[in-house]
Image (spheres, rainbow, N blue to C red):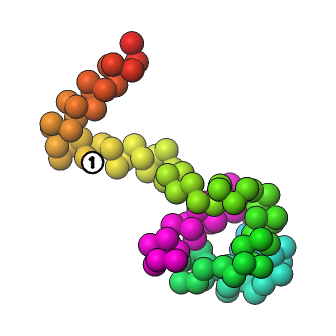
């Protein structure tokens, strides 16, 4: 697993954990690993073993594919901010996206 993949997986695990209102300590308890290991996984330093991965799926109550849906890593606010920054820096992009928007919104 590449470093980027580890980071994306870790961010996704953290996002799901936070949405479920779960602390790292609680997740670690449910997965039966030490809390620092959850932190290392979420920060992309480690990737989970098969056993830990299965434990994460059960503890977070998700399907495997949900942990690899990386486009969900950013919040709607983060997406808006990223888009606004891109639009502010590139008028052609703004006009292109506007045309697409008009084509699908009508």
75 left or right, relative to 26: left
Say how many tags the image has.
1
Can you identify the residue that label 1 sits on? 85
Snapshot quadrant of residue 105? top left
The verdict on residue 17 being magenta is yes
Snapshot quadrant of residue 20? bottom right
Q: Position of residue 66 (x, y in %)?
A: 65, 55
Q: Position of residue 80 (x, y in %)?
A: 39, 43
Q: Is residue 75 above or below residue 101?
A: below
Q: Residue at x 20, y 30 (%)?
A: 95
The verdict on residue 84 being magenta is no
Q: Residue at x 76, y 64 (%)?
A: 57
Residue 41 visible to an observer of this rendering: yes
Q: Position of residue 99 (x, y in %)?
A: 26, 24
Give the dominant element type of the magenta stretch: helix, strand or loop: helix
Of residue 90 and residue 71, the one placed in the foreground of this image is 71
Q: Residue at x 42, y 47 (%)?
A: 79
59 left or right, relative to 67: right
Q: Secondary structure at mark 1?
A: helix
Q: What's drawn in magenta, residue-wise?
A: 1-22
43 left or right, relative to 24: left
52 left or right, relative to 106: right
Snapshot quadrant of residue 18? bottom right
Residue 73 visible to an observer of this rendering: no
Of residue 27 and residue 6, the one placed in the foreground of this image is 6
Quarter that holds the C terminus = top left
Label 1 crowd (10 A; few <14 / some 14-19 / many >=20): few
């Amino acid at each position: 697993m590449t470093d980027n993949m580890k980071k994306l997986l870790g961010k996704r695990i953290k996002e799901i954990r936070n949405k479920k209102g779960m602390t790292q300590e609680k997740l670690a308890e449910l997965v039966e690993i030490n809390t620092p290991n959850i932190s290392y996984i979420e920060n992309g330093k480690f990737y989970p073993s098969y056993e830990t991965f299965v434990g994460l799926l059960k503890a977070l109550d998700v399907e495997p594919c949900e942990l690899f849906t990386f486009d969900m890593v950013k919040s709607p606010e983060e997406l808006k901010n990223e888009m606004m920054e891109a639009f502010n820096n590139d008028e052609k992009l703004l006009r292109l996206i506007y045309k697409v928007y008009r084509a699908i919104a009508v």
